[in-house]
Amino acid sequence: MGTVLDLDHLPAPRRAEVARDAIVALTVPSRFSVHARHDIRGRIESWSFGEVALIRTTVNAGQHMIRTDRHVRRDSAPPVLSFAQRRHGRAVQEQFGVRRELGAGELYCTDLSSAFEYANAEGGCGQGLQVPLASLGLPGEVVRRGAPNLARSPLYPLVADHLAALARDAPALERDESAAGIGTATVELVRALLVSAARGPDGAPGTPAEITLARVRHHVLTHLADPGLNADGVAAAVGISVRHLYRLCREAEFSLEQWIVRNRLERARSQLVARDARGRSIAAIARANGFADPSHFTRRFRAAYGTTPQQWRRQPAGPPSPGSRLSAGGCAVGE
């Protein structure tokens, strides 16, 4: 369920302090200041999509955030990357020795686990994602090369549009049974974005294999409910031959069929213990995740997790929720 902080409902003298504390809590320890010519007003809203968190902010106050090497050394939280956009106004970001001016609509990445500085004078509206670095599985050098250069990737418009649409429809999407799958698809998109951006202008010509595989994964994750999902349909959706698809998967040591089944099972497992799905039958959940035969679903589920769907649903507590920082919300840096 989305978290909302409405600054307008607080006494005016307390708004700067509350906004500062909220943004630091939702991101990382830092020196953070909030300032406005008049009374500070606005909202900070956050949602969770599996392991990915999203925040949307509308605050009329300027912000200045400095994360130092000392903050980094004292912070034991898992590393997280931020992917954010400002909806209007300008800002400045500096990280890894690169200083950038950010315009409205521009997608930018910040490694929240490293030192950085961010400032804007006017405040404004924006949205951002927090993605655990461990989920991306990328070397630090790829992140350092790719993060300041997202716009040179051919995936840049796709990811920017994805973030804007996710923020626009976040309340409805978080309630949907596919919320965790949306988070997984988002991880795949930003991984491919960073890899392609890190290649540089002298990289190999043509569409990198990583980008094509990201599109494959994105198509699969948005069509898991289709029992007819197969290599033929996936290849057609991304505009390549089935032979080319299997060659890409083989070179990446990636089994398409196994990956489809694993993600269907993961989504079904989350739905089985979701509060709003308690009234749905196991067979209905199986069908909603592409398993036409409930018995086949039960066999697959038991082989993967060592328990039956019914036993999993009866457990006292569902699987652990994301970490406290991610559960609280998404990236507020630069909003």
Image: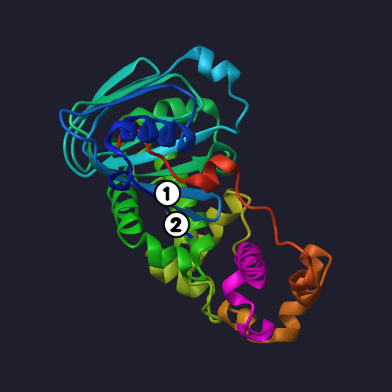
Measuring from the top left, give residue 258's x and y in whole percent: 66, 64
- Residue ID at (55%, 37%): 133
Dot 1 falls on a residue whose secondary structure is: strand
Measure the C-alpha gap from mark 2 to mark 1: 10 Å
In the image, is residue 182 above or below residue 144? below
Quadrant in which residue 91 is drawn: top left
Between 120 and 21, the one lying in front of the other is 21
In the image, is residue 288 above or below residue 152? below
- Residue ID at (29%, 53%): 164
User: Which disc number belongs to residue 54?
Assistant: 1
Measuring from the top left, give residue 257's x and y in whole percent: 62, 67
Answer left or right for 82 relative to 79: left
Q: Is residue 301 visible?
A: yes
Badge 1 local density, few (<14 within 10 Å), some, or many (20+)?
A: many
Measuring from the top left, give residue 161's x and y in whole percent: 28, 54
- For label 2, the residue is 2
Looking at the rendered image, the quarter that the C terminus falls into is top left
Between 63 and 14, the one lying in front of the other is 14
The amino acid pointed to by label 2 is: Gly
Answer left or right for 36 relative to 75: left
State the extent of the magenta-drawn residues as a range.
Answer: 257-284
Dot 2 falls on a residue whose secondary structure is: loop
User: Which disc number belongs to residue 315?
Assistant: none
Quadrant in which residue 19 is drawn: top left
Majority SS type along the magenta span: helix
Between 144 and 54, the one lying in front of the other is 54
Measuring from the top left, give residue 286's x and y in whole percent: 64, 80
The amino acid pointed to by label 1 is: Leu
Q: Please, which residue is most extreme toward the right here?
A: 306
- Residue ID at (51%, 27%): 113
Q: Is residue 259 magenta?
A: yes
